[in-house]
Structure formats: structure tokens, C-alpha cells
Image (spheres, rainbow, N blue to C red):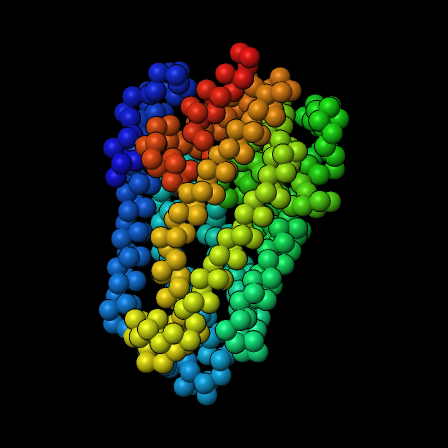
Amino acid sequence: MLNRRAASPSLPLELVGLYDKEKYAEQQRYFAENNRFGSIVNTATILVILILLFTGLFGWLDEWTREITSDSLLWSTLLFFGILFLANELFSLPFEVYDTFVIEGRFGFNKTTPKTFIADQLKSLFVSLILGGVLLTIIVLLYGWLGHRFWVVACGVVIVFILLLNMFYSQWIVPLFNKQTPLGEGELRTEIESFAKRSGFCLDNIFVIDGSRRSTKANAYFSGLGSRKRVVLYDTLIDELTTEEIVAVLAHEIGHYKHRHTLQMLVVSVLNVFLMFYLFSWTLDNIQFAEALGGSRPSFALSLVSFSLLYTPIGLVTGVLINVLSRKNEYQADSFAGRFGLSEALVSGLKKITVKALSNLTPHPLYVKVYYSHPTLLQRIAKLYKMGKK
Ligand SMILES: [Zn+2]
């Protein structure tokens, strides 16, 4: 609500000229629509959770899955979460369809065909079931063998899992959904080559991804560790920005690499996983966590559900801390680009990306502090200009 009230029908002074009047009115409509849609999704989600809690359906499902698997810890837990996962997918599907084809479609962002959409849904369902199933199996087996103290080992397994995903995300997961090609010959490549030399980054690690298959929105990101590192540029970014602006955006991404931000975030998620497992171990074998969900005996599955509900407010706090760190990293990557004399190009590139995506220019400051992983456009411009003056 604060964020909705902070929406300004007139452009902030510093950004006059960024949008024309019509385009800005469109941005305001887009923001209002997304905000309203978000409230509907959140309300529906809370209602479903309340219904599940008050009817004791979690407890009933736990009892049922234990009965038909003859009380096998592994199979009943897998079945329990398999059903919850599929139910959740079905619940969120209409919202996703509405978001993609109605909202994004109406504002001209959507390029996803129904065929691509269905294929995406099936592929991500498959990937989630495999990855989640394997991880859950390992965790439950460890619990079966080691009892209460399983969490230290399970924590280690999850950390290895996160490391592997981080390293192989670009090689294993992305190709299921997108094509990545090395940057082709031409002016852009020559310019990037010269920048790569100046900054000491290997050009072989720069890829172009076909983001235009799904959306007109532009983006770029850095992923991977060590020799698996790569900068990925969206083809939409290359179409929209000038060569110098692209080099500036690329410099920002290389800045993330030079400042070891991926590694830093990895350490943070490892600590986070450790905290989660430690807290989760408290809920195990405790009948009260099962009874709260309508169960009648201690249950691994019910403990995990109780834990995830109770963890939500803690997760909000850790999320705020992680966002503080992430926003600091964004400034650092910006100033890396600035050190190569690319401040102005980065500002004009960021402006184009923001306008293209109809991003909110005036979020409420508190909303930014809690939810934003990136500083706002205005904040970034202010920092870059300040740096340019020094
Ligand atoms: Zn960044």
C-alpha cells in the first residue's frame, strides 16, 4: 500500500524527458495493474494457507500418505511433497497465464507463444521434480540413518548441491529453455574485445541469449564460478542499446566478477542454509508441530511444513540483509564501469532499459529497503554522477 501511494503521476524532476507524457501514463497504468495483481495473488495465497491450517488438511494428507506407503518414511515424505508441489503448480498456473498473456501481453512485452509457455511449464516441472526429488530423498535417508543429528550432514549435501547448480547452471539448466551463442563478429565484438583486454576479462566467456523468444524486456547477468564464469547479454539488450551502452552494461557485469560478488553471495547462502537446517532440526520429533497442522503423531513432512511457515518472518529479515548487501554490490559494479569512463554510457543504457520495461521510478523508500535487490534508477544515477565529479 505504501508503494502504491508513493507512485507519482508526474515524472521526478531529475528524470524529466525520460518518458513522454503518454508513455509515462502507460508506465503508471502498468505499475497499478501489477500492484493490484500482486495483491490478489497474495490474498489468494494467504486464504489457501488459512483454509489448509483450519481444516487440518496437512495432517490428513500426512496420515493418508503414511497409510498407503505402509509408513515408509522415504516414500510417504516424497508422496506428501509431490502432491503439495503439484497442487501448488495447479494453483499458480492460472495466475501465470494471466500475468504472461493478459498483463504482459496488453503492454506489448509478451513474446511467449502458448506452445513455448506449455513447453516451459513442463520443462520446469520436470527439472523441479528431479532436483527437488533427489535432494529430498538424500535428506530423508540421512534423517532415517542419523536421526536428530542428521542436519549437519544434510546441510553439507545442500551446500554441495548449491555449488554444483551455481557452476553448471549455464550448461545444464539454461539450454533447456534458451539458446546461448558466443558473441558474433562485428563492431560490437571489436569494441567489447578492446574493453575485455583493458579490464582483463576473457572474451570467450561472453554469450548472447535469445531472451526475445519470451519477452521484449532487456537484461544482462553474470553467472558461474571459476572457469565456468560467463556474462550473458540478452539479444533484446543488443537491439535496443548503442555499442557504448552495451559495453558499459557489460563492464558493470564484469565488475560483479572482479569484486567476487558471486562468491560472496554463495557464502551468504551457505550461512543461510546452515541457519535454516539448525532451526529445522528443532521442529523434528516434536508432536506439537504436527498437531498444529492437524496431525496426531510426529512427522518429518509436517515438521518441514510447520518450519517453512514459521520461517517466513525470519526469512523476511534475512532477505532484507541480503538485499542490503546486493544493493551495495550493484553500486560497486556501477563504479567499476565508471572507472573505465563509462558512467555516462551506463546511465543512458540504464535509462533505456528502465523505460523499455516501464519500471517504477518512484518506489517507496521502505519498499526499496525491504524488497529491492538493486538500487533505484535515480539512486544509481546520483551515485554515478557523484563519482564522475570527483
Ligand atoms: Zn548488477
Is 309 situated above or below 286? above
Name the residue furthest top: 389
Tag count: 0
**Is residue 156 found left or right of 319 in the rendered image?**
right
Residue visible at 57% across and 78% down?
A: 145
| Residue at 59% from the left image edge and 21% from the top image edge | 338
Left or right? Give the position of 72 relative to 37.
right
Seen at 27% across and 36% down, the residue is 2
Give the residue at x 43% y 67%.
282
Q: Quadrant of residue 237?
A: top right
Q: Note whether 102 is above or below 70 in the view shown.
A: above
Please determine whether, in this image, residue 48 is positioned above or below residue 342: below
Image location of residue 389, percent across then percent down: 53, 11
Q: Nearer the viewer, residue 354 or 291?
A: 291
Position above or below: 324 against 8? below
Would residue 111 be seen by someone viewing this image from the given angle?
A: no
Q: Residue furthest bottom?
A: 70
Give the percent coordinates (x, y) of residue 381. 47, 21
Task: Give the percent coordinates (x, y) of residue 239.
Answer: 57, 29
* Image coords of residue 357 (percent x, y): 44, 33
Quadrant for the C terminus in the image = top right
Q: Quadrant of the N terminus?
A: top left
